[in-house]
Structure formats: C-alpha cells, structure tokens
Image (cartoon, rainbow, N blue to C red):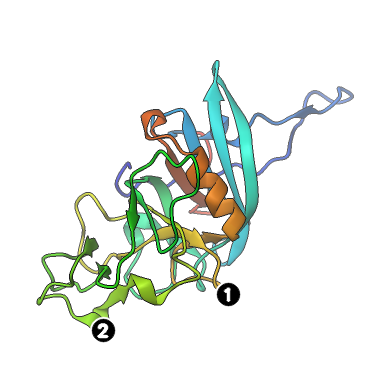
C-alpha cells in the first residue's frame, strides 16, 4: 500500500472526441489510476459517492500491457460510506479509500479450489485484536492475548456468514496507527452495510480467492466516482 494515499476512481463511461466524431469506449478503470500497486492483478471497489453504502467490485488482469476484466460483482461498504484512509477513525463505520495490498486470506470454510494465496483456517480460538491498548492491535491472534480485551476484538468464528471466506485488506496493517482502525477485510455479505469492510456475494468471494495469485501482487483500490475519495490519474 501507499500509506495514506488518496485513490481516485474515474467514472466516465465514454471519452468524448471532437464534435461530430463518434464516441469511443473509455480505457479500463485500472488504466486511469495513478498507482495500481505494481502488480498484474487489481481489484477495484467503487462507490458512486462518499456516503454510498453500495457499489461495484471488479477484479482485473494486466496482460500484454492491457487491463482486462476478470469478473465483477455488487459490493457493500461501511454504513457511513467511505473516507480517505489517512483520515479514518476507528468505530466510525466508514470504509477506508485508498490503495492497499492483500496480505492473506482466511475463512471458517475451506479455501476454494485453486486458491494460491496463503489461507488461514478460522479456529475456535481465532481472534482479530482491535484493542488500541494491545501490543497485538490489528493482528490475528490465537489465542487472544491477555492485553487484548474481548469487547474490543472480533471472535472470527462468531461470524459464520461473513467470514466463511475473506481476504485481509492491508489498511493500517504494516505499521498500525492507533485509533485509525483495525480488521478491514473483503468478505462475504452479511445482512446489510458493513462496519467498514468491503463485502460481496459468496460466489464472488470464492471466485476472487480462486483467481488471486500472490506472484502477481494483487492489490485493492477503494474509492468513489467523484469527490475527495475519487480515483483519477494524477
């Protein structure tokens, strides 16, 4: 990830030419980004505006210099919409906009067939520590350490629908900043908007995990069509 980077997604569906000339299709979305992480796989999660709680998630391959769409699905975002990652505060139910790596995947269910990324099985004592006072802040722990309060953490096995399969989003992960937020994942849809994660239908989550290849350095770009959290070429 580029820490604190504001990623902006361009939303134009057509590029207009000179008056009277036919319109031509816009370039693929990743081609409009200032940064795609340097790999040859990318996930884009785009909301129409900052306060939106739903949008579109698309996964892309870069082959022979051209980005091509590998799949797409409806996506859900935080209950309070999106905010720039470096401005986010924990507990605000906002999804952090930015460009992030994808450290590893996990799940209560087995990894989908063909999964290449590191996949951790969720066990009874698997927790994600979100306690700002803990040395394990924003980390998977097994078991939960004494300095990480259960009331400030997620007991992963308690979410059999959302965490059937999931992918860790590297927001605030490499060098965690306290109070910025913890436990931001790409996971299976629950009943409504998320607490800050990005979620998709179960079949899309399985497809993404079977598609992702760590050798191709996949990243996720989260943003909006316009405004301060939008994705455009700088």
Q: Secondary structure at mark 1?
A: loop
Place of residue 108 in the rendered image (x, y in percent of width and height, measured from the top left): 41, 64
Does residue 226 appear in this view?
Answer: no
Mark 1, residue position: 192
38 lies left or right of 61: left
Q: Residue at x 56, y 35 (%)?
A: 60
Q: Earlier along the polypeptide chain: callout 1 or callout 2?
A: 2
Graded by Cα atoms within 10 Å as few (under 14), some (14 to 19) or many (20 or more), the crowding at tag 2 reads few
Question: Seen in the image, is 210 located left or right of residue 85?
Answer: right
Residue at x 28% of width, y 65% of height: 180
Residue at position x 58%, y 76% in the image: 191
Q: Which residue is mark 2?
A: 151
* Image mark for residue 2: none
Query: Image point 43% across, 74% down: which residue?
Result: 159
Numbered disc 2: secondary structure: helix
Where, by quadrant of the figure, is residue 227 drawn? bottom right
Image-based side of 53 in relation to 148, left or right: right
- Residue 127 is at least partly visible in this image: yes
- Where does residue 215 sit, x and y in percent of width and height? 37, 29
């Amino acid at each position: 990830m580029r820490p604190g980077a504001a990623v902006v997604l361009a939303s134009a569906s057509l590029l207009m030419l000179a008056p009277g000339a036919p319109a031509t299709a816009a370039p693929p979305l990743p081609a409009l980004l200032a940064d795609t992480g340097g790999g040859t796989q990318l996930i884009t999660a785009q909301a129409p505006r900052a306060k939106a709680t739903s949008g579109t998630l698309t996964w892309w391959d870069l082959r022979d210099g051209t980005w091509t769409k590998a799949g797409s699905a409806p996506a859900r975002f935080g209950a309070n919409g999106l905010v720039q990652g470096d401005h986010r505060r924990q507990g605000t139910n906002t999804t952090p906009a930015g460009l992030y790596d994808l450290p590893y995947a996990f799940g209560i269910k087995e990894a989908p067939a063909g999964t290449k990324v590191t996949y951790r099985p969720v066990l009874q004592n698997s927790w994600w520590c979100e306690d700002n006072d803990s040395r394990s802040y924003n980390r998977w722990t097994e078991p939960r350490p004494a300095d990480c309060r259960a009331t400030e953490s997620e007991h992963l096995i308690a979410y059999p629908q959302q965490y059937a399969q999931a992918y860790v989003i590297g927001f605030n992960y490499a060098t965690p900043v306290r109070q910025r937020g913890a436990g931001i994942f790409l996971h299976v849809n629950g009943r409504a908007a998320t607490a800050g994660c990005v979620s998709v239908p179960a079949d899309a989550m399985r497809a993404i995990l079977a598609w992702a290849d760590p050798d191709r350095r996949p990243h996720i770009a989260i943003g909006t069509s316009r405004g301060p959290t939008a994705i455009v070429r700088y």
